[in-house]
Amino acid sequence: MAEITKVKETTPQGTVLLTGANGSLGLSLVQQLLEQYPSYSAILTVRDISDRDPNTEALRKLLSRFPAAKATIEVLDLASLSNVRAFAEDVASRVSTGKIPPIAAIVCNAFSWSLVGMKHSSDDYELGFQVSHLSHFVLVLKLLDAMNKSTGRIVLLGSVKHDGAERFGAKFPDDLEKVIKPPSDKPGEEFAQGFQRYANSKLANVMFMLTLNKRLAKDPSLQGITAVAVNPGDMPTSRAFQHVPFAFGMVLKIAAFLLPLFQYFTSLTSTKSAAINLVAMSVGPEASGSRGYFEGQKPVQSSKDSQDEGWRERVWKVCEKWSGLKQSETVLNIGEGEY
């Protein structure tokens, strides 16, 4: 079960690093952060920073409403592990030289999925798993030393689909190599397989959170850093649903129309409501010291599969292997070895 342990916030300021800042949820997150907690600095990452990207332009327009904000838009390509490493090292350097405050929160919001056929990253890995989990795995572990060691927070995004009991729920194959390099989708199975891959990335996030908390707690210099995985709810108005099969898209349009009613007795929610919860979990005093899995701001038990410590260790180790992460890249004792 998730836990909430109230601790005194010793630093009311710091840097909030948000991935996927120009997405539907990302834009709402930025707005809520700047409205509620303007004292924080913010690094807002996007894949394409050019003027040609309408989503990044929407982010710039939003920032123009907050002229006093200490926020920068920066490039982070989660589809490239070398880019993730370079970005993390640059941020860590800026913290160590005092150019930016220590990191108060890393919000791993960015994700990728495809329900119309598999896609690959520049590292030749399945794109969804790399963007949604593996690159965040590297980013977080490389930036631990740049975090506020007393109150730093890591926020990963989960989903109800991380539970294998759900339809299209997560299920890791015995051969974990098939997670990062799955077989090609059979004709007609693109939707189901795409959802399965998405679910697996969310299960990996929850497993990472649980194992990370356990390892952080063992290190006296890092035990003040906490991690949560948050299911923000299903957001039918999200742009993530732009490229989906026609029938599924029609269902989402109906759900979006009825959202004011449905959100009271289903997992459907608005991006604004989801953002309010995520900002609270990231920097809000009400969530200081929180660890574990949450639905919005409510602590709940994560799935049975996520509780399997043997599987969690296997997934952690194989992510070290896939990412090439070395002990020299993180202050956390990762205990390099075979999975």
Image: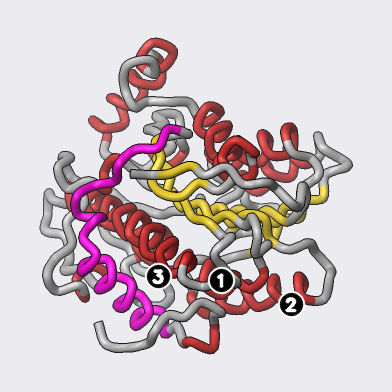
2 or 3: mark nearer the eye: 2
- On the image, the x and y values in percent for residue 70 come to 82, 50
Magenta residues, as a range? 298-324
Q: CA distance from mark 1 to mark 3?
A: 37 Å
Q: Sequence-wise, which precedes: disc 2 or disc 3?
A: 2
* Residue at x-position 58% and y-position 31%: 276
Q: CA distance from mark 1 to mark 2?
A: 23 Å
Q: Sequence-wise, which precedes: disc 1 or disc 3?
A: 3
* Residue at x-position 36% and y-position 23%: 253
Specify few, some or many for label 2: CA neighbours under 10 Å numbering under 14, 14-19, or 20 or more. some
Question: The residue under label 3 is which amino acid type?
Answer: Ser
Picture quarter with the C terminus: bottom left
Query: Vertical placement of 28 versus 103: above or below?
Result: above
Location of residue 177 (image quadrant):
bottom left
1 or 3: mark nearer the eye: 1
Question: The residue under label 2 is which amino acid type?
Answer: Ser
Query: Vertical placement of 151 versus 159: above or below?
Result: below
Left or right: residue 155 versus residue 67 is left
* Residue at x-position 41% and y-position 79%: 323
Query: Vertical placement of 331 versus 204: above or below?
Result: below
The residue positioned farthest toward the top in the image shown = 261
Residue 309 in the magenta stretch? The answer is yes
Location of residue 201 (image quadrant):
bottom left
Do the numbered discs 2 and 3 sit on residues whose CB atoms are within 8 Å? no
Q: Which residue is mark 3?
A: 121
Q: Which mark is residue 93?
A: 2
Q: CA distance from mark 2 to mark 3?
A: 27 Å
